[in-house]
Amino acid sequence: MSFPKVGTAVVTRGDGRLALGRMGSLCEQIRELTTQGFEVILVTSGAVGVGRQRLRYRKLINSSFADLQKPQGDLDGKACAAVGQNGLMALYDTLFSQLDVTSAQLMVTDNDFRDPDFRRQLNETVNSLLCLKVVPIFNENDAISTRKAPYELSLQDSSGIFWDNDSLAALLALELKADLLVLLSDVDGLYTGPPSDPQSELIHTYVKEKHEGLITFGDKSRVGRGGMTAKVKAAVYAAYAGIPVVITSGFANNNIIKALDGERVGTLFHREAIKWASTGDIDAREMAVSARECARRLQALSSQERSKILLDVADALEANEEEILAENEADVAAAQQAGYEKALISRLALKPGKISSLANSVRVLANMDEPIGRILKRTELADGIILEKTSSPLGVLLIIFESRPDALVQIASLAVRSGNGLLLKGGKEAKRSNAILHKVITSAVPPSVGEKLIGLVTSREEIPELLKLDDVIDLVIPRGSNKLVSQIKAATKIPVLGHADGICHIFIDKSADLDMAKRIVSDAKTDYPAACNAMETLLVHKDLVQTGGLNDLILELQEKGVSLFGGPKASSLLSIPEANSFHHEYGALACTVEVVEDVNAAIDHIHRHGSAHTDSIITEDKEVAELFLRQVDSAAVLHNASTRFSDGFRFGLGAEVGISTSRIHARGPVGVEGLLTTRWLARGSGQVVDGDKAIVYTHKDLNLEA
């Protein structure tokens, strides 16, 4: 049995009118839950607010001009409740009726609960309604309540007295033995400070022993009697009596359903919370702040000391290869048993020699020129003032990646080399692999820096909180599906760097060397079909249809086991199935083929259907090649080479944190330079601006070396 309680601020708008959209969403959630077999009891506020708005309007239209000049006293609350209850329940009845749900109204007062017979009858009535699939809707009968002052709830209070609808909901949840109580508010949950303060953190799990006395509450609800103070008191009362409670937002979509599904929305109250807190888990902000502090200590090291950390990481990877591969094999076996796609399992597996290859790539990074603090430009601003533009770490990176555990090694080593703090969230399918790799890498970070330089996020529920930390996290890089990247971009104010799709093209021009073309096309599609830089669309000049070159290319792909789908022209010419869309990333041994008029048509096709990732042309005509290289607006454009070369290691970057199709900051494979920004350092000798009256600007470019 679940018990949503909705407050006045949720069911009414700022002007006092009913919030039809939020009420409709609430009713739809309850209908969904009842369809799934849940028993739902609703406790609702709002009658006083609705009645006040109606009576104010009635008073206004019945007032003379002289009446309006007099001071306006507040309306009687009990009269407001009597008028508003009728309209509130009428709306609930209408909304539920549209969803084929029957509801029932039950009005109670605090004195009712003093009578044992009332409590017994209450249980019988509610159970009868639930058996009939009716949703009971409770509200306090404010119009006739005789309460004069609030009562404090405590674990020792067995009188059954309540003060507001929050404590009524807690009381009913206990009386009717609910499985969960959900208190809906106008904020996401309980915060460490005012929710509007950027420094305030959402408390996911309330630990009475930790948070009681540390939290200060603001004003009461703008329209109701309760507010967060009342909700927390009611939640603590119910939770410590055995009913789990979630305080969450009634403004967000489907939060009741999410709470019942176990998602971390809002603040959870549970009497076992102290045991969970003792496990030593740290929250999202703590993790991000720790990464920033460790990054600053890392930046303070010498170049040689930072290089040694990476050399130690490489040695640690090779020393722990057997354990790493064992954990990875367990992940692969679990993924196969779970029925994951072959492309994902291919990305998940650490193939023979992969650990040595990763270690060598880390050593390449360790031995590269120092990237931090490089002087990029020196300028004399005026006599005695020298300005330097220098390279600088971004700060704290949040990298969200799917499937590939080797990405963790690349990303972590790039973060160390560029002096950045790092938070990593890998896919659940690589949980064991990521955990052992994180342990091995952080064990190589010296205590003077701190292993919290690289944090491993183990639960996807932590991601929404991390995405809110735009004051601590400087860049998010999602590596994964189009859906993942789109979700991340929509959920954060933090800058996002990444690519949603890898729709890579190869265009075979009429002048192409066909033997070369077959080798390149075969490599681009079959070397690693799951990679984002694998060819997904093959464009062929129309003249190759007449010469038979197209048939040779198709035969080459089919011999390698590639499934072919055609555009309108190619599907007809080759008798192959027509592709559903040109904008499709197969990530497998499959690709789309289409015939185009010429290089200009190929460029137009790429711009219409591509993802600005990597595109290549095969041609012996240098003018055509240059036209393609200049005009195709993708992050990487190649001539007579496989799209598979678009990679951080192959581009000589040592490794890559991802491939960006953004046009801001970094584009293409993102290595160390893509994780750096710039700072300006000025050295003067006492100069002041003073309206620029006594200074002569020279703006003279100087040699980079002082």
Image: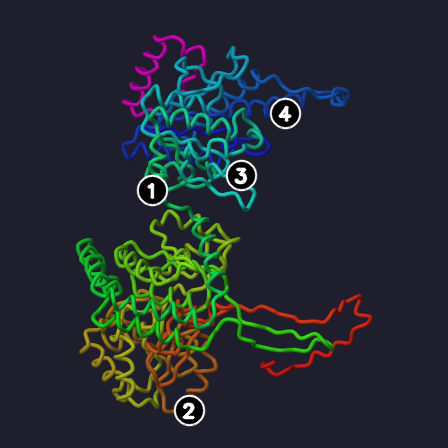
The residue pinned by badge 3 equals 193
Q: Are marks 2 and 4 in contact (CB under 8 Å)?
A: no
Q: Are marks 1 and 4 in contact (CB under 8 Å)?
A: no
Element assignment for label 2: helix
Give the mark nearer the N terminus: 1 vs 4: 4
The CA distance from mark 2 to mark 4 is 79 Å
Magenta span main SS? helix
Element assignment for label 1: loop
1 or 2: mark nearer the eye = 1
Residue at 39% x, 77% y is 367
Give the mark nearer the N terminus: 3 vs 4: 4
2 or 3: mark nearer the eye = 3
State whether residue 485 appears in this view: no
Q: Nearer the viewer, residue 166 or 229?
A: 229
Q: Amino acid at mark 4?
A: Tyr
Q: Is residue 349 left or right of residue 268?
A: left
- Residue 551: percent from left, percent from top: 23, 83
3 or 4: mark nearer the eye = 3
The CA distance from mark 2 to mark 3 is 65 Å
The residue pinned by badge 4 equals 57
Give the mark nearer the N terminus: 2 vs 4: 4
The CA distance from mark 1 to mark 3 is 24 Å
- For the N terminus, give its image quadrant: top left
Q: Are marks 1 and 3 in contact (CB under 8 Å)?
A: no
Q: Amino acid at mark 1?
A: Thr
Q: Amino acid at mark 3?
A: Gly
Element assignment for label 4: helix
